[in-house]
Amino acid sequence: MPETPLAPLVGLVLTGGQSSRMGRDKASIVYHHAPQWQHAGALLAACGVEPFWSCHAQQAEEWELGDRAIHDVVPGHGPASGLHAAFSRGDWVAWLVLGCDYPWLEAQDLQGLVDARSPTVEAVTYAHPATQQIEPLISLWEPAAQQRFLRAFAGGEDSPRRVLGQCALQRLTPRMPPRLENRNRS
């Protein structure tokens, strides 16, 4: 019996939040040689994935994103609003998702998610070795996982971690756990 083909892969950088805990736009912080929104997009591109950005209108205009900007349809739910907007587009694609507040990730970390894709799983994510807590904002969401998320979101669930945890999930161990450090506070 032939294997089910995998959906085409695109990237999503989540940048549209209010950065209320950080106190400034975390997507504009420079950790490397470019603002984090650009750096995250470059990481996705290095994996052969076309990046899109979940962002607000001002960011889209300043960054000249054009049709690569995805705006929240249902604002006010943090990263879940960005996922909802991307997953609601109706494209039959898999989304390689990266929050803009993970500055220590490298392209090979994202490539690990891509390489672990399989028709038998709905999503691929990293799990912290010590806690086994999964990272929904450093994950690859296949169409089945997206549909699960959209149903849960419509029912009032806005925790990407809880929804992702209910998927047929491939959990990977990071090659270097500090790469998963979230810089959500200044």
Image: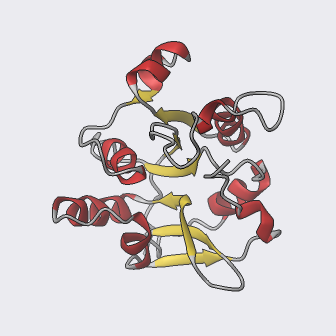
For residue 85, what is the image quadrant?
top left
Q: How many marks?
A: 0
Q: Residue at x 58, y 35 (%)?
A: 24
Q: Is residue 43 above or below residue 158?
A: above
Q: Is residue 132 left or right of residue 145?
A: right
For the N terminus, the image quarter is: bottom left
x, y (%) of residue 101? 63, 48
Q: Residue at x 74, y 58 (%)?
A: 109
Q: Residue at x 78, y 50 (%)?
A: 106
Q: Is residue 17 above or below residue 69?
A: below
x, y (%) of residue 52? 50, 33
x, y (%) of residue 99? 57, 49
Q: Is residue 115 above or below residue 166?
A: above
Front-most of residues 169 and 55: 55
Q: Residue at x 70, y 44 (%)?
A: 47
Front-most of residues 74 and 142: 74
x, y (%) of residue 81? 33, 47
Front-most of residues 71 and 97: 71
For residue 17, what is the image quadrant?
top left
Q: Is residue 30 above or below residue 8?
A: above
